[in-house]
Every structure is written in C-alpha cells, then in structure tokens.
Image (cartoon, grey):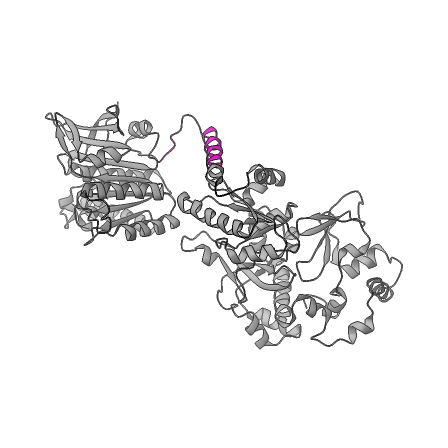
Amino acid sequence: MLIEEDKIGLSRVKTHPRRLGVSLSRWGRNLLSQCPFHAPEESTLFFYDSLGYWRYHCMSCGASGDLVEFIMRSRFNGLDENAARKEALDFWGASEDEIKSQDDENFPHAKEIGGTKSRVLESFVRYCNWAATKSESTAEFLKARGWTLEQSRLYGIGYYSGDPEPFYSYGLLCGLKRHEISFYLDNLDLSHEPRLTIPARNSKGVLHSVYGRLLDVTTPANSLEDVYISYASGPLDIPFNIQQDIESPIVVEGVFDVLTADLAGIPGVVSTMYQPFNRSHLYKLKSCGAESIALVLRKEPNRRNQELHIRKCLELAESEGIKFKSIILPAGETADTLIQSDGAEAFLERIRDTEEDTMRTHRKTVLLQDIQENFNTAISRDPDSDVGYRLQNFPALTHALDGIQPGYYFLSAEPYGYKSHALSSFALDLIEGNPDVKVIYAALDSPRREALNRFISMLSGVSETDVHKLNKDDDVNHQILTATQKIISYVKNDRLEIWEDTESFQYEAFLKELQTELSEKQNLILIVDGVDHLRISDRSDIPDLNERRSSAILDFYKELDIPVFVSGSVFKEDDKLVGPRPFLRDADATFWLERKEDGALWLTVNLKNSGSILYEANLLFSDKSYRMKEKES
C-alpha cells in the first residue's frame, strides 16, 4: 500500500502546529520553524496541511512525517512507539478509546475535511502525490519551473497518468467504493492525458476539487481551457489558495503564480484560475476579511479591453467599500516568472509602489505603469537593432521604419497591378524572416485562387501562367511543387491565411474574427489588398464611403495593435498624391510604387501628415513572378 492506513486515524487527529510548543513564523500559507533534528539555528522546517492534515517537512535534512511523529521524535525520545503515541494523544487532549469509538461518519478527519467527498478527493491526492515520486516527466516539468519534488510536497502536488484503473484499485484498498469514486471524481475520464494534480481547498480548508494541469502545452491547439481541468465537479468561483483572515489579498491569474508566491513567503496570494475577477470572487474574499485587493494581471495584447475589465473590477470593489489597486505586469511576464527572477521583495515592492485606484485616478495609474514599462523596454533593447518585424528583402526600408511595427500603412502603385505584387512580396518576406509571425492576406481585388497562384509564382520564380498547368520542363514542375509544399506548410503551421471578399463587410463581425485570431497568435499582421472593394454595411454613422473604410482600418489598428497594410487606388495632381484623403491622412506611412519611363521601379515612403520622404529606392523585380526586393547599393 502507498501509506500505512492503520495510522491514518492517529495522524489526522484534529490539531494545529501552534500547539506543539515550538517557535513558529508565517511563511506564505505554511508555518516555518527551526529544525530540531539537524541544526536548530536553521529555519528550514515547514509545517503544511496540503494533504488534509498537518505534516512537517525539513527542506534541509529531509525529516518528514505527521504531527504525532513530530511529538515522538522531538519530545518522547526513549519511549517505545505505543507509549509515545499515547503521550502524544494525551498532549492533544484525545485518547485511543475516543478515536476507536467514533464511527466512519463522525471520524475526526471526516468531520474536519468535509465528509465522503473529501475522503475520496484526499485519497486521490495521496495517490497522485505518491505517483509524482515515480514520474520522470513530473520531475522534469517542476525542474523547468524552478521547483523540486520536495518543494511540491508542501502543496500536495501530484501526478495522474490519465488511467483511472490504478487509482480505483488503490481506493478500494483505502475502503472506498467504486461508485463513490465515480460519483465524486466525475471528471476522471474527461481527459486521459498525463497531468500534474493540484488540490484546491475552500477558506475552511475543505478540499473541494483537484485541478489537473497538462505537462506539455506546446501544441497550438491547447487553449487555457484545455490546459487546466477539474477532476471533481464543484464551484469554480472559489479563489485558489483562499484562506481565513486575509485583509489584503493579492489576486493573480495562474496556479503556479500562487504556488511560487506562497513558496517565497508572500502571504494572501490567491488565483482566479484564469477566470475574469468577478463579484463572486469578491464576496468570498470579503467574507474572509478582505479590506483591500491588489489585482495582478498579465499584459494582454488588447489593452483597451484589459483597461475596461479593470474599470469594472474597480467599480465592483468601490460598491463594496473595498480598496483596490491593479498592477499590469510587463509583456510576457507572469507573477511566477517575476518572483523567481527578481525575488519576493521586489514583487511586493511593485505592489506597494502602485497607487490605490479610484475611478478618478485609474487612468493615471495605468499611464504611469505604461511609462515605466516603455522605459524599461527601451533601455533593454540593442541600439543597433530594429524594433519591429523584418522585411528580409528590404533591409534599408526595414531600418528606415525601425522595423515593421504596429501601424496603418497605405500602399498604391502605377501601374495599379504592381501594388498586389508588392504586398505579396512583403507578405512572403515577413513570413520567411520572422518565424513567429502570422499573415492574414485579405484578397479583395481578386479571387483567393489568384492570390494563391501569385504566392506560388513568387516562391518558385516562374510566371503565374506556368503555375496553372503542367509544364514540359520537369525542373519547372519541381519548382512549382516545392513552392506549393512550402505554402501548405505555412498554412498548416498557422503562418498564412488568405481570406476572400464577402458579399457584405460586417465591421463588428470582422473585428471579432480578428480578435479571435490575435488571441491565438499574438504576432499577427493584416494585409488588405484592395480597400476600394471593402463593403461596409454597419458604419452608417459615417456618410462618406472612403471615410468609413479608413475609419474601419484605423479601428483595427487601434483595437488590435498590429501592423495593417492596405492597398487602394489614388489620384495625383502635379505628381503629388492628393486622394482619397482619408487614407493619406490616417495612414502612418504612405507607400508609392511607380514604374519610370526607363523601366526602373521606384518605391517612395512618406511619413504621415508630412511631405518628408522617409525612404526612396530603386527596386529589382523578377521578370516572371514580379517578386520585388531592394537593389543592393
């Protein structure tokens, strides 16, 4: 058996380490003391209750056990085990007869941790806790997060293989019935993938659920909903790691954000399990004595939506008379990573230095955080590097723009057809030169098939005419096949999508679709080829058609904060671009591609609202595919 079942009753007598007569200090959720078994001057002995009853574990010498064993080892040396246990139970005011006289339902551990359901869940936690010691993948996962198996034991972290049968057998040995396991662990068959298991308790210490976290989340299909599951149906609005008597809880998003903070000795850190903070979370924290709340959020790509969410949380807190402050972490950082890299004190200092929010000061607080983050990001960059994405065939243009950054870029050409070839060249350059980028190419001027053939033509170096049919030259056919396979790989790896024109352009629907794409792929670039054919059916508030189109594109950029390239026709006057005015006015930069009389192809880039030329260069292009690149100087 995994544990000595005949000792469960003794080890689970209701008690608390504070009654042991040793000097204790709070360390996160746990209690910390000097270890009497190897070196009293070292505070390395943890008392923790992750398995439903208090245990001790020394991080230095490895001594561990339940509180009865602690009494036996530290106070009753020289007595035999039975006498020591009797002395220990007398010390707690209980006796063997009292323990034996209680039936199963009134057993102290059952009353303390919530009856039959918690007995089932506790058995599952103990089983998974044991299984973690046998799992190499668990040890590797924890090591990658900066954890050890010894540390994970303090929180009852375990391992579940996905196969329920071994646990059913273990449960039967522990006196559980199979139908009880199936009833209370009703999601045990929900996923058969190996997962890390993490027990979750309510504020009274009652185990209400066991979460399972995927060990491998590298596949793009895994959303946050797939990463975490609950093996037992129950309330989803209980903040993870909630405790009694927390006046100033720190609310984070992830489980490991909480666990790392608690291990570092930061008290009162709870998690919403990636759910938006809501009224139910607030009520539960308020019932535990919360007087102020610090909401720590990971930075989202859509800052506008994140600020709106914070304002709702602030209104909620103010309505309940609770002080509130919000902290948005630097991009790509989590509470877990920041605590591990900078330490607990730096994390707490970040929270202390953030001003308390009110509806009047909220915008200032967010602005100050943005200023600090922008400064920290700027001084960490290499002065010779470009900030945005690379156009590998246009190095001088990339440098002039400081990389392709989030913005609104308008491109036109004379002859007009060259603008599609220029945008296609940019699209392929961005995909080939930036491994994490995804390009959405909206082909509004032509069918999707034509845009696809243009990409294949450019990758193979043959004409679009040759792409349509079998060629007599086997080398040409091989080039077309290789290019087609490359396009297929881009699509399969979520690097390229080609969208066709639709009967009517629903602004809100298009924006929502792009937001979904951005949530799955942060490095997104939108290219709209042929804005003149953009039909807008739900922007009747703007009468001028070009104003509607330009406003829609501008909103995409502002809402999504991504690079947006748009092509369309323009009219000139005395060699100057004069219209359509909305596109020339709103675009951050205007690209003008022109074929000169001598056959040379020139690209000129002008800054927004400025006559100054940012970039001007002679381009080379393939006579067959019309793929473009800069002429080497």
**Residue 124: image location, x then y, percent:** 61, 66
Image quarter hosting the C terminus: top left
**Residue 243: image location, x then y, percent:** 64, 55
**Residue 66: image location, x then y, percent:** 75, 60
Q: Residue at x 44, y 28 (%)?
A: 382
Magenta stretch, residue numbers: 367-389
Q: Quadrant of residue 136?
A: bottom right
Q: Residue at x 53, y 49 (%)?
A: 318
Name the side, left or right, on which 453 lies relative to 285: left
Q: Quadrant of residue 422?
A: top left
Name the side, left or right, on which 275 lies relative to 584: right
Q: 440 or 134, which lies in front? A: 440
Q: 498 or 80, which lies in front? A: 498
Q: 418 or 567, which lies in front? A: 567
Q: Quadrant of residue 384?
A: top left
Q: Residue at x 35, y 44 (%)?
A: 560
Name the side, left or right, on which 372 lies relative to 24: left
Magenta stretch: includes residue 162: no
Magenta stretch: includes residue 371: yes
Furthest residue in direction left, as rendered: 597
Seen in the picture, residue 145 relative to 599 is either above or below; the reply is below
Furthest residue in direction right, as rendered: 78
**Residue 521: image location, x then y, percent:** 38, 47
